Amino acid sequence: MLTQRYEAPTTVADAVRLMQADPQATPLAGGTDLLVQYRVGLRRPSAFVDLKRIPGLVGITLDEVGMRLGAATSAAEVCEHGEARRLWPGLVEAVGLLGSTQIQGRGSVGGNLCNGSPAADTTCPLIVNRARAVIAGPQGERTVDVDGFTTGPHKTVLAPGEVLVALWVPRPAAGTGDAYLRLIPRSEMDIAAAGAAVSVTLDKGGTCTAARVAIAAVAPTALLVPAAAEALIGTKLDDAALVRAGEAASAAARSIGDKRGTAAYRRTVVGVLTRRAASIAAARARASH
């Protein structure tokens, strides 16, 4: 008979030690995905290692360089952070899509990323905002770009004994705006059939000087789409540029069909979402000037 343990380390070193000693243990950053998976038999860890009692893994620190977001910080805390909402409105809006109010009190951005779902709402906004994952392990600390953090459905770069401790997001350049949109089959609390995040930087004349586009739920992992960004850079984000970006996003999609939509439907929708998200991001960039 399998018996689960509950561990509540108070330091990162203790968490790493516990994870290294028991490869079947799993971190608990909120549990809103993990405990559901446990109840239906998809996950059977030997121990739950609660990260919420470790200083630095909960909380938001903002300075002139960027934001450090503790991996176990609740979604609710992120949504209530006024400066984060001002600097990264698209990212914070995506965090606000994580389930119900009750779920947001426990669920975390770090947990959403580590769950490794191709449809995760926060992964694409993190990618377009050039976020980096800070990972602690037996060999010390390392950082990984979020666009390379997930390697497949529910698979990540975390090695045995490693724990995600924080996400670092650089401050956006002047004239930058971001946005994230998704399509869900129901009106609330559903998994995205497709999603798109866009970040654009405009000069004072309104020309796009930098862009990043990422799409969700249309491939085994969230995808950064350089061709979509290239369609926007050097333009004033007119309709023709937005259409080209949407077409590039659709072309990059590697969709499967399931109960949330056919592969062809998802490819079409992700192009539409890309165009709309780029338009919203552009409006925010113009307003920031």
Image: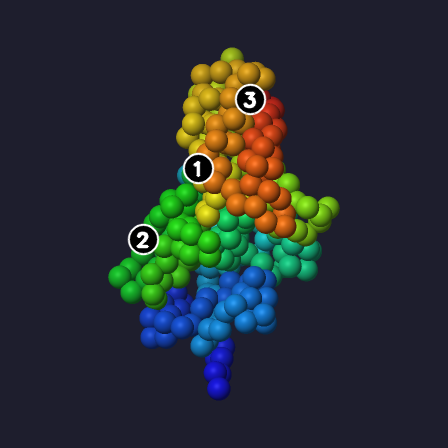
Mark 1 vs 3: CB contact within 8 A: no
Q: Where is residue 50? Give x, y as percent.
A: 49, 69
> Could you tell me which secondary element the residue under label 3 belongs to?
helix
Q: Local crowd at mark 2 within 10 Å, few (<14), some, or many (≥20)?
A: few
Q: Of the residues under marks 1 and 2, which one precedes in the sequence?
A: 2
- Amino acid type at mark 1: Leu
Residue 243 tag number: 3
In this view, the mark in front (1 or 3): 3
Task: Tell me if 216 is positioned left or right of 182 in this view.
Answer: left
Q: Amino acid at mark 3?
A: Val
- Tell me the kind of residue under disc 2: Arg
Residue 169, compared with residue 52, is above or below; it is above
Mark 2 residue element? strand
Res 224 label: 1
Q: Earlier in the sequence, mark 2 or mark 3?
A: 2
Q: Residues within 10 Å of mark 1 (few under 14, many from 20)?
A: many
User: Which mark is first along the chain, 3 or 1?
Assistant: 1
Tell which residue pokes out farthest to the bottom in this image.
1
Outermost residue, right direction? 187
Query: Disc 2 versus disc 3: distance between alpha carbons?
Result: 39 Å
x 56%, y 41%: residue: 263
Which residue is denoted by mark 2 in the rendering?
142
